[in-house]
Image (tube, rainbow, N blue to C red):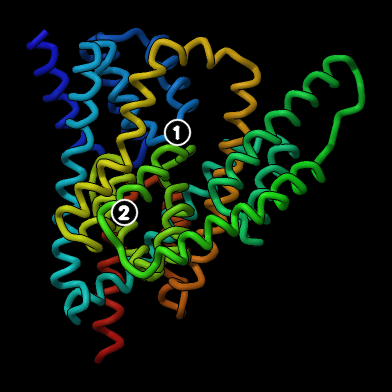
Amino acid sequence: MHRRLLELAALFLRLGATGFGGPAALIAMMQDEVVVRRKWLTQEHFLDLVGTTNLIPGPNATEMAMHIGYIRAGPVGLVLAGLSFILPAALLTMGLAWVYVRYGALPHVAPFFYGLKPAVLGVILTALWRLGKASVKGWRFLIIGLAVMGASFLGVHEILALLAGGLVGMFWLRLCAAHESQGKKPLAPSCLLAGALLRSRPLGAAFAAYGSMAAAQVTLWKLGLFFLKIGAVLYGSGYVLLAFLERGLVRDYRWMSQQQLLDAIAAGQLTPGPLSSTATFVGYVLLGIPGAVVATAGMFLPSFLFVLALSSFLPRLRRSPWAASFLDAVNVSSIGLMAVVTIRLGQTTLVDWPSWLIALATLAVNLRWKINSTWLVLAGALIGWLLSARLSL
């Protein structure tokens, strides 16, 4: 058992320290290590784990590490694999946060952020396009995504919009499937979906009002509770995290500006491991090392609990048509939320022609050649520095 624990720690520390490119790249690296090289799992078992992680909230790659740890060494292996995978990204992100707090406002650093922010926006647009193509499997899914997107613009809280989109979408998709299997005319209750989302506006307003009342001061307790709530409901890509951060940090609590949020996202892009380590950056900027620890713990603790509690139950749940429909509806709802926050970030970031040029170039290059997002962000920072130097001459 001790040997297995050491193997898990060594493997996931290395993957956490070198795994750039987002959850798809991280999961591909795990597949190569545990299926091809070490033969800890069969290909079928690994793919089944990938499917089950999609059924629970939280960062998928991190939960895959936890699942592998549980299968290899039980609950202790789950905790060890998860911590080993998260730790390198958290430490590196905290280091970037220290540099940002100390030097971020100085002139010799600002030119790099001038190009870095539109490059990050280009990376987000690429993820939005690719995830949208995978999630929108037909016109019904498009309606679900657009309804959630519209509800978010109208002020419905993101958590409520996500859950309403998932639940109403699940019933709609299952009813449509039942009608079509009997040769009946397909149902199109799009008004039901829109109505359910809009009726949740009063409750969403209550969420926002609570955030506004709490905006006076950030404390460790409020910070930890904020990220614990996000970690417990975050479905889809790590980029969907941006919608929750923008709502809570910028609009409700007013703990950060749009520009600071973009800087936090950039830090998550520049470090390996899960993008959710952005929470570490936010925590450090707001409350130093204690804030970084509390924010990181709040972000990832639900994943540990979900995987531990559901590891034996999820494979059966995955075969349920209702669970599959709920997942499909939640995924496309997540894309709708992601589109809204991308538009808002674009309004802050795209302020002149160089920023537009960097963002569009990043999008085009990423779509054409699928270059690692880290290199694109670094290239944007370099271009921003060169443009700033030229404009200052």
Does residue 105 lie above or below 41 as drawn?
below
Q: Residue furthest bottom?
A: 393
Q: Nearer the viewer, mark 1 or mark 2?
A: 2
Does residue 187 lie above or below 68 as drawn?
below
Q: Is residue 296 left or right of residue 310?
A: left
Amino acid at pointer 2? Leu
Residue at (30, 48) in percent of width and height: 224
Residue at (85, 31) in percent of width and height: 187
Amino acid at pointer 1? Pro
Image quadrant where one finds the C terminus: bottom left
Image quadrant where one finds the N terminus: top left
The label number, if any, that marks residue 360 in the structure image: none
Q: Is residue 28 visible?
A: no
Residue at (65, 20) in percent of width and height: 322
Q: Could you tell which of marks 1 and 2 lies nearer the N-terminus?
A: 1
State the residue position of label 1.
Answer: 57
Identify the image quadrant of residue 27. top left
State the residue position of label 2.
Answer: 223
Identify the image quadrant of residue 38. top left
Q: Are the residues tagged 1 and 2 within 8 Å (C-beta)?
A: no
Residue at (34, 25) in percent of width and height: 64
Q: Is residue 146 left or right of residue 299?
A: right
Depth check: 81 or 369 in front?
81
